[in-house]
Amino acid sequence: MGSIKVAVISAKGGSFKSTTTMLLATALGREGFKCAVHDIDPQGTASAWLSSFEVENVELFRKGQKYDYEFADTPPRVKPTKEMTNMVKGSNINLLMCSDSPLNVHATRLTVENMINTPAIKRKSFVIFSGVAKGTKLGRPEALDKIADNVGIPRLGNPIHFRNCYRQFALRGWKALTPDAKQEVNGLALALGAQLNKLLS
């Protein structure tokens, strides 16, 4: 089997899309998986990230190389470009980033309507909640499940909570994360792997 292709999508900027892409790739890289990132976001955040310091087993995609995982960091869009549509169709799994903000939920729902719009694509698409404040009613699992139902696709794993160390991650890498943050990211990576096992079996 070739590399596993993961498309990371968001309706709007500031949704932890690039951060989550790099967090998951880094977590998998630390487990020995060779990961590539396709940076098709015009902001080039992932490219800047990987040019700042070396990340174990993670690099920008290079044609002709073999990878275990290929992550696509896509532009924040409600209406997809042709390139995004092809990536979503050709991926093994789509991860749609969403915060618990009502405006972000609304934009995410529109993205689902415009991009996650066939049974085959919807079957392999999941929402990840990011920037969620701990200890709030909206941050509870049952509340997030309700928001995911409203968006139209199930959620994947635990949310990425709002933590200052995730901002430092872009500057200092994995060592910037607190033990709780590392556990959170590793838990999400495990949830990704478990879902992929179901989809690929």
Image (cartoon, rainbow, N blue to C red):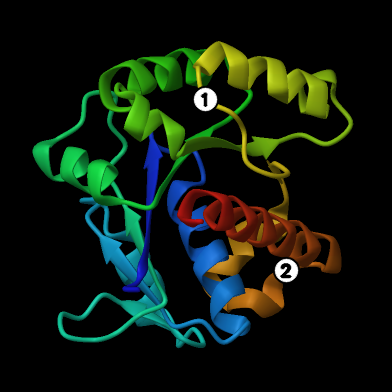
- As drawn, is 6 to the left or to the right of 186? left
- Circle 2 sits in a helix, a strand or a loop, which is it? loop
Residue 148 placed where, x, y %? 60, 22
- Circle 1 sits in a helix, a strand or a loop, which is it? loop
Q: In the picture shown, does residue 9 fall above or below 171?
A: above
Quarter of the image where the N terminus is located:
bottom left
Q: Which three-letter amino acid code belongs to the residue tagged 1? A: Ile
CB within 8 Å, label 2 to label 1: no
User: Which residue position holds label 1?
Assistant: 153
Residue 12 makes an appearance in the image = no
In the rendered image, the residue lying farthest to the right is 135
- As drawn, is 40 to the left or to the right of 99? left
- What residue appears at the point 59 percent right and 77 percent down from the top-left corner? 172
Q: In the picture shown, does residue 9 fall above or below 65?
A: above
**Residue count near mark 1 (Cα–Cα under 10 Å), binned few <14, some 14–19, many ≥20:** many
**Which comes before the other along the chain, label 2 or label 1?**
1
Q: Nearer the viewer, mark 2 or mark 1?
A: 1
Q: Quadrant of residue 185?
A: bottom right
User: Which residue position holds label 2?
Assistant: 177
